[in-house]
Image (cartoon, rainbow, N blue to C red):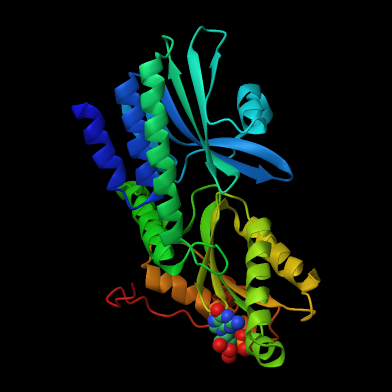
Amino acid sequence: MEALLKHLIDITCQRDHALLDSSVASALHELVGAKQVRVHELFRFRDELFVRPRVWIQDGEVVSVEDSLTADHSGEAISKYPTLVDSIKDRKTCVEETSAAGDHILWLPVWLNDKVSTCIEVINSAPYSGETLHMIEGIMCVYRNYQNILDYSERDSLTGLLNRKTFDEKFSKLLASSSSDVTPGNQEDRRHHNTDGIGQWLAVVDIDHFKRVNDQFGHLYGDEVLILVANLLRSSFRSQDRVFRFGGEEFVVLLRSTTLEQARHIFERFRANVEKHEFPQVGKVTVSVGFASISNESPVVILGHADQALYYAKENGRNRVCHYDELVSSGLLHSEVSNDEVEFF
Ligand SMILES: Nc1nc2c(ncn2[C@@H]2O[C@H](COP(=O)(O)OP(=O)(O)OP(=O)(O)O)[C@@H](O)[C@H]2O)c(=O)[nH]1
């Protein structure tokens, strides 16, 4: 009872999804005495549903995918887990199966607004008693309620995208984890990309002439355009990338683990998706995009680079994607001296 209370206090003091996942995994691992607990993320890619662990137990400790930039983000097709597929089809919250090795596996899909984007897997060598199942059910209810509360505080109410406050937290965390990966010997390599040319990218996206939409059609249509652009952002990027509404008609995208060529291609594909889209009543809408590599510079400098590239795109025809480093190396932009003293967040 005391251990359960301790874990419930730990779960309910979290203000961040990743920490909430970790404290729930730790509670289930310790209270059930489970061999393994994984918190999986379910995501759609090219019309297929995939599963990818977000948190798991390794050497008795909880490990989170957010702790590492190098973790494998690809995931597995959900069809590899038929019991999980059935549990979702039947709208169940708990299904048990026995593996070929004799382990007892519990699949616990988390239902939020009729959708499942998270599922917990608990693996145990012994069968689960009625009392244990009852306790797991209680922990899952607390977990679901807390996910709801966190979603509400992390998201923008109009578009449902992550909000500016969440960007500040996530971006600082991403930079901290990338700089903690730096060892004295490889500092220069990590400054921009790893040796494969794979890097992280930040883009600022701004709707072109949005004021005209509001002026010509009214704010309700303006809001509708914002919602539709947010949907196009969601469908144009992978689920491990992060999309934020930064304020007004400006959005920020964090693109993980791609080369410069891929990043350019992905941002260009999004720009083209918006250009092709028919917006009800309003007709055609375009966006400009400025992007920069996520280096070991401060958040204000990286954001400033992407902003400068966006400004260049706006000044040079709009409806285009511009890359900061390329503009600097071709002499079209002047690199700014970094000023880490500036307080931005
Ligand atoms: N409908 C609606 N409009 C908003 C919202 N937030 C900001 N805006 C409007 O967005 C417009 C932004 O206008 P500007 O910054 O002049 O930029 P723009 O017209 O998009 O022009 P460029 O960016 O130069 O292409 C302003 O009219 C704001 O009132 C919102 O939540 N809903």
**Which residue: 46% across, 66% down?**
163
Quarter of the image containing the C terminus? bottom left
Q: Pinpoint residue 315: horizontal percent, then vertical percent.
A: 63, 88
Q: Is residue 30 above or below residue 55?
A: above
Residue positioned most to the bottom = 215
Instruction: Report how many numbered discs are placed on residues in the image.
Output: 0
Q: Quadrant of ligand 1?
A: bottom right
Residue 31 in view, yes or no: yes
- Quarter of the image holding residue 169? bottom left
Q: Is residue 167 left or right of residue 255?
A: left
Left or right of 59, for residue 211: right
Residue 321 appears in view: no
Residue closest to the far left: 2
Q: Position of residue 224 (x, y in %)?
A: 67, 74
Task: Please tell me which residue lies in front, 96 or 29.
Answer: 96
Relative horizontal placement of residue 339, taking residue 243 as reference (left or right): left
16 relative to 34, above or below: below
Give the image quarter of residue 29: top left
| Residue 329 x/y as whole percent | 56, 74
- Identified at 41% across, 9% down, the residue is 126
Q: Is residue 140 above or below residue 207?
A: above
Residue 330 position within the rendered picture, expressed as x and y whole percent measured from the top left: 60, 77
What residue do we see at 68% from left, 57% from top?
235
